[in-house]
Amino acid sequence: MIRKESRSEVRAKKHMRIRNRFSGTADRPRLAVFRSNNHMYAQIIDDTVGNTLVSASTVQKEIKSEIDKTNNVDAASYLGTIIAKRALEKGITTVVFDRGGFVYQGKIKALADAAREAGLEF
């Protein structure tokens, strides 16, 4: 009998293939995005030393209070603007976008577009 892989296993494999292609450096860190069923998380990471430079998520109180739901496209676009503002405050202007194995549509695309509009380049 053929065993079908779960969606999370397929996503994890995709993410590892993507991560083998690029990594964040000090001058161009990686914008990593993760979405669960209830929340979204975004981090800007310098992979050469393994430090998270900037992070934002819909779990944080100041972000959660501004949005109605934490798992829709509006929340994702708001999170994109917040992560871009925090990155620009730290002096980060260009990043490498890591979609985390997720398909580039819906919430992931909304976060990326909002981050671009707020001033991040990728």
Image (tube, grey):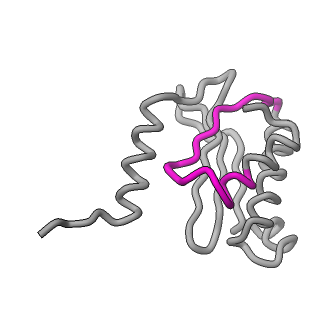
Percent across and percent down for residue 7 are 40, 64
Percent across and percent down for residue 85 are 86, 45
Residue at the image point whose x is 78% and y is 31% from the top: 121
Percent across and percent down for residue 115 are 79, 45
Q: Left or right: 101 with respect to 9?
A: right
Task: Determine the residue located farthest toward the front in the rendered image.
Answer: 1
Q: Left or right: 102 with respect to 94?
A: left
Residue at the image point whose x is 64% and y is 55% from the top: 105
Q: Magenta segment range?
A: 91-111
Q: Left or right: 29 with respect to 61?
A: left
3 or 20: nearer the viewer: 3
Residue at the image point whose x is 72% and y is 70% from the top: 72
Percent across and percent down for residue 12 are 40, 52
Magenta stretch encompasses residue 106 = yes
Q: Quadrant of residue 75?
A: bottom right
Q: Left or right: 96 with respect to 64?
A: left
Task: Determine the residue located farthest toward the top in the rendered image.
Answer: 27
Q: Quadrant of the N terminus?
A: bottom left
Residue at the image point whose x is 77% and y is 57% from the top: 79
- Number of labels in the image equals 0
60 or 106: nearer the viewer: 106
Magenta residues, dominant SS class: loop
